[in-house]
Image (cartoon, rainbow, N blue to C red):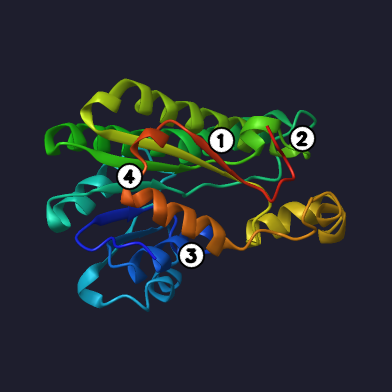
Amino acid sequence: MFDLTGKTILVTGASKGIGAAIVDALGRQGADVIAHYGSDRKGAETATAAIAKARVKLIGADLAKPGAADRLWGEALAWKGRIHVLVCNAAIMAFEGGFDDPDPVWEKTWAETLQINVKAPADLMRGAVRHYRQAGGGILITISSWNAQRGSTNPATIAYAASKAAVMAATKTVARAYAKENILAYVVAPGVVRTRLSERFAASLGGEQAVTANLAMGEWIPPSDVASLVTYLATGTCRHLTGATLDVNGASYVR
């Protein structure tokens, strides 16, 4: 489909769901893939099983810990001395921390969500931009969410929605500030993707049937759809698409 031979790509949250589909797709198109995982190394190994071992680097890092993202970037960059594309995918969605929850739960949820979903990606973006400016360019792809634009239907996940909006704004800032230096930045905003996280979210709203009934296509998005889009963006073929937010929701939310 797309030739990514010679490109080194770092993907966070690569052990399951969208991240696993992304690393598999990138690897199949010839990319050298750095697959980040939190604790599920076996999941990352499974996701990259179809890629030649010489083209895969697995790195574990707990992004909940301050400084972990900087260490991840440093180890990833040291592998080949060049990273052409950064895909910020890792995120958490807590099903608590809403307005009615106790203060300790509220504080804990917001602190963890902002650290993993905003601060860690921002640290990685910082490392990427610095590297790209010296290397003559590069690509940043952020996996956000339609919740960043329309809000969440479950108020308990308000921290998640807010964090996805924040990381979207950060990516757009990179796009605007560094376009003249050949640094391209894109936001992918999926709707309901077939992942364990979405299944838990659906359960919190009464089950899959209730969620599916509100989707224009009457079906959930396969992770491979998001992976195919990310693979295309990683080529840098359409440079003037930089700064764009690309919706993947089957016409269920049309802006």
Identify the amino acid type marked 4: Ala
Q: Earlier in the sequence, mark 1 or mark 4?
A: 4
Mark pair 3, 4: CA separation: 24 Å
Mark pair 3, 1: CA separation: 20 Å
Mark pair 1, 2: CA separation: 15 Å
**Label 1 belongs to which residue?**
164
Q: Nearer the viewer, mark 2 or mark 4?
A: 2
Q: Residue at x 37, y 42 (%)?
A: 238
Q: Residue at x 47, y 41 (%)?
A: 116
Quadrant for the N terminus in the image: bottom left
Q: Earlier in the sequence, mark 3 or mark 1?
A: 3
Secondary element at image label 2: helix
The answer to whether the residue labelled 3 contacts the one labelled 4, judged by CB atoms less than 8 Å apart, is no
Identify the amino acid type marked 1: Lys
Q: Quadrant of residue 51?
A: bottom left
Secondary element at image label 4: helix
Q: Residue at x 32, y 46 (%)?
A: 236
Where is residue 84 drawn, in percent x and y?
24, 48
Q: Nearer the viewer, mark 1 or mark 4?
A: 1
Mark pair 1, 4: CA separation: 20 Å
Mark pair 2, 4: CA separation: 29 Å
**Label 4 belongs to which residue?**
68
For label 4, count other residues whose C-alpha is less than 10 Å away and answer few (under 14), some (14-19) or many (20+): some
For label 2, count other residues whose C-alpha is less than 10 Å away and answer few (under 14), some (14-19) or many (20+): some
**Label 2 belongs to which residue?**
155
| Vertical arrangement, residue 107 with respect to residue 37, above or below | above
Secondary element at image label 1: helix
